[in-house]
Amino acid sequence: LSAVEEVRAVLQRFQDGYTRRDLATVDEFMEMFLDSPQLEVIGTNGIQPGTEEWYLGRAGARELVAGDWEGWGDVRLKIAEAHIHVRGDVAWLATPATVSMDIPRRENIRDYLGYVREMIEKEARQPEELLNYILRGGTNTLYELDRGEHFVWPLRFTAVLVRDDGKWLFHQMNFS
């Protein structure tokens, strides 16, 4: 296999794990990730390193993966469309994807109100800015509810892998 084909095979194994979502296999799944404090896995809400969904190290990456498998939607990477580049022992890739979920209307509203409650309790924004943020999110929630209960969102998945001891391992990834 060429290096590009090897990386594509790792990407397929990654997709297979996200398709199965078997929490009993999450530790085995994590063997595809570099065991290093420099490992970074950035979720869709990752803004600052080490906070929210910007996880550092394998333990942090495991937290994101387990959380995704427990409560996020159905992730589908377009593996055949992945742009994969390799130079020596480093590979980087980008591919389109989707995440889909069924969210009942009442649950969607309840979840947003819970989010607002959390935001009010811990948010350091100025009151007017916070109110604008809440109103924008509430309006967006109502807009999305008119689309129904099945949601499909476009996603971009990017990653950097390194070849370590002959195996390609994720060093950094970003869901956006």
Image (cartoon, rainbow, N blue to C red):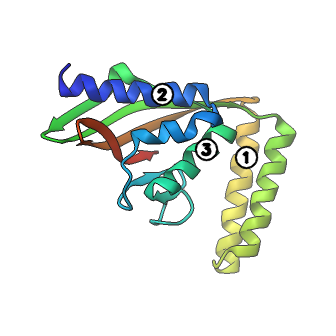
Q: Where is residue 161, by image quadrant?
A: top left
Q: Which residue is mark 2?
A: 15
Look at the picture and state if 130 lies above or below 112: below
User: CA–CA distance between discs 3 and 2?
Assistant: 14 Å
Q: Is label 1 in a helix, a strand or a loop? A: helix
User: CA–CA distance between discs 1 and 3?
Assistant: 26 Å
Tell me the mark number nearer the camera, choosing from 2 and 1: 2
Give the side of residue 84 with respect to residue 97, left or right: left
User: CA–CA distance between discs 2 and 1?
Assistant: 29 Å
Q: Which residue is mark 1?
A: 141
Circle number at residue 76: none
**Residue occupying image coordinates x 27% and y 26%:** 6
Q: Amino acid at mark 3?
A: Ala
Q: Amino acid at mark 2?
A: Gln
Of pointers 3 and 2, the one earlier in the residue sequence: 2
Give the side of residue 145 with respect to residue 40, left or right: right
Residue nearest the observer in this picture, 100 or 160: 160
Q: Amino acid at mark 1?
A: Thr
Give the side of residue 117 with respect to residue 16, left or right: right
Quadrant placement of the N terminus: top left
Q: Residues within 10 Å of mark 3 (few under 14, many from 20)?
A: many
Q: Residues within 10 Å of mark 2 (few under 14, many from 20)?
A: some
Q: Is label 3 in a helix, a strand or a loop? A: helix
Of pointers 1 and 3, the one earlier in the residue sequence: 3
Q: Is label 2 in a helix, a strand or a loop? A: helix
Look at the picture and state if 91 lies above or below 16: below
Q: Which residue is mark 3?
A: 66
